[in-house]
Image (cartoon, rainbow, N blue to C red):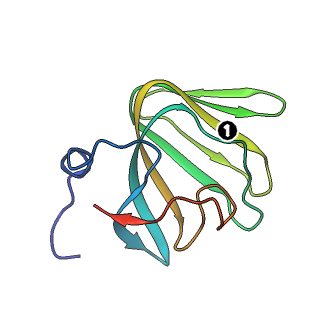
Amino acid sequence: MADKISLADKLATFEDHWSPRTVTTFNDCDVMVVKVNGEFTWHKHDDTDDFFLVLKGNLDIELRDRTVSLGPGELYVVPKGVEHRPVAREEVHLLLIEPTGTPNTGDKATAAARKLA
C-alpha cells in the first residue's frame, strides 16, 4: 500500500446505507466501511465469521438468544453459521473485514454489490 487511508475521508464520499465500500484488501479479505441505519435482514454466513468494528454511533447485533450492543471503538465477531441482524437506531459508521466475495446477506442473490471507496 503506497499511502495511508483515512476512513473518515472514505465515509465522506457517500451517503447511502447498507452499501459497503472496499477501501483496501488484506490477506484475501476486503476491508470495508459502511454507513448503516435501521434494521438489516436476518442472515448468516456458513463459511466465514462476520467482523464488525463501530467507528461512530451505537449498533445492536441481534442474535436469536441475545443482543450484543456496541459503541465507538468496540468490535464483535459473529461466528460462522450464527444467524444475526445488525440494528442501528441512528446512523452508524462501521469497519467490516470479510473474505473477498462474501455476500453481505449470506446469499449472493440478495447481496449488495461491492463498491470501491
In this rendering, the answer to whether 25 lies above or below 79 is below
Q: Residue furthest front?
A: 109
Q: Is residue 45 left or right of residue 31?
A: right
Q: Is residue 25 left or right of residue 100?
A: left
Point 23% across, 52% down: residue: 10
Residue located beneath label 1 in the image: 85
Residues 101 and 110: in front is 110
Point 64% across, 68% down: residue: 108
Image quarter of the N terminus? bottom left
Q: Residue 85 location in percent, x, y? A: 67, 38
Q: Residue 29 location in percent, x, y? A: 49, 71
Q: Residue 64 location in percent, x, y? A: 82, 34
Point 18% across, 48% down: residue: 9
Residues 98 and 90: in front is 90
Q: Is residue 44 left or right of residue 15?
A: right
In this rendering, the answer to whether 27 lies above or below 82 is below
Q: Residue 83 location in percent, x, y? A: 78, 46
Image quarter of the C terminus? bottom left
Q: Amino acid at mark 1?
A: Arg
